[in-house]
Amino acid sequence: SIREITQNTNNSPPVMNPLVITASDETSITLQQPTFTSPGVPLPPVQTRLAYVGLDGTISVNYTTGVVAGSIGPSQDVSAAGASFVGLTPNTAYRIIVVASNTSGLSIREITQITAYSPPVLDVLNISFVDANNITLDAVNFLSPGIPAPLAANAYLAIDGAITVTPLGVIGGAGPIDGPHDVIALPFTFTLLAPSTAYRIIVVTSNTSGVSIRQIVQITPP
């Protein structure tokens, strides 16, 4: 006597591992390709392995439906690679949400990342007045003040060839050196200079993210 019966085993929902951020700077965040503790059966189709980014506290996800609200820009497919979210604001908290699903259910993971501060970028220096004994340096302008904004922009003067500056903004050289003088808001006049002499002015400004340096050479007239 022979009897037969057929039974299908149940499908299983995907289970994602915690998300990993591989890089972040002032305006971008890079998400590593999500991995699975269990990819589920059937495997999640490509169009449902999606990553979203938004401001932390604004973006949200419905854990029942997988619908994301408050994201910035379109979602990114992370089925075969990671995702880079660009054009972000410095020093801002963002939340990334990844939703994977199959016919059995959802797997949702979230991670937050704060973008870095941005360094300042000085504009070119400008000399507004010069005579035999004086050089007036205008107050500096910024191509970008950075975040946080620098507290000072220090100007130094010495005979050209007798002053140096390192990439970190450390002033050196044989001198004589006049400075520092803050020119972030007001011009400054270097006085008691020698006629017919080439002087170099170096301006250094910084914040917690970096240093910006500008230099200019001015010859005093006879």
Image: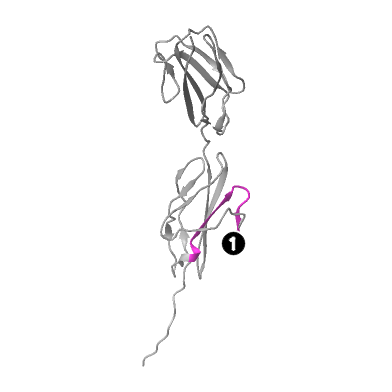
**From this viewpoint, which residue is outermost toward the left?**
1
Q: Position of residue 3 (x, y in %)?
A: 39, 89
Q: Nearer the viewer, residue 38 or 164?
A: 164
- The reply, left or right, for residue 161 in relation to residue 185 is left
Q: Position of residue 62 (x, y in %)?
A: 60, 60
83 versus 157 height, above or below: below
Label 1 amino acid?
Val
State which region is magenta: 47-68
71 versus 201 height, above or below: below
The residue that appears at 46% across and 71% down in the rendered structure is 11
The residue that appears at 58% across and 16% down in the rendered structure is 188
Asked if the stretch drawn in magenta spans residue 53, the answer is yes
The residue that appears at 50% across and 8% down in the rendered structure is 193
Asked if the stretch drawn in magenta spans residue 158, the answer is no
Q: Residues within 10 Å of mark 1 (few under 14, many from 20)?
A: few
SS for callout 1? loop
- The reply, left or right, for residue 59 in relation to residue 77 is right
Here the colouring is: one colour
Q: For residue 131, which quarter of the picture?
A: top right
The residue indicated by pointer 1 is 67
Q: Nearer the viewer, residue 18 or 200?
A: 200
Q: Nearer the viewer, residue 194 or 201?
A: 194
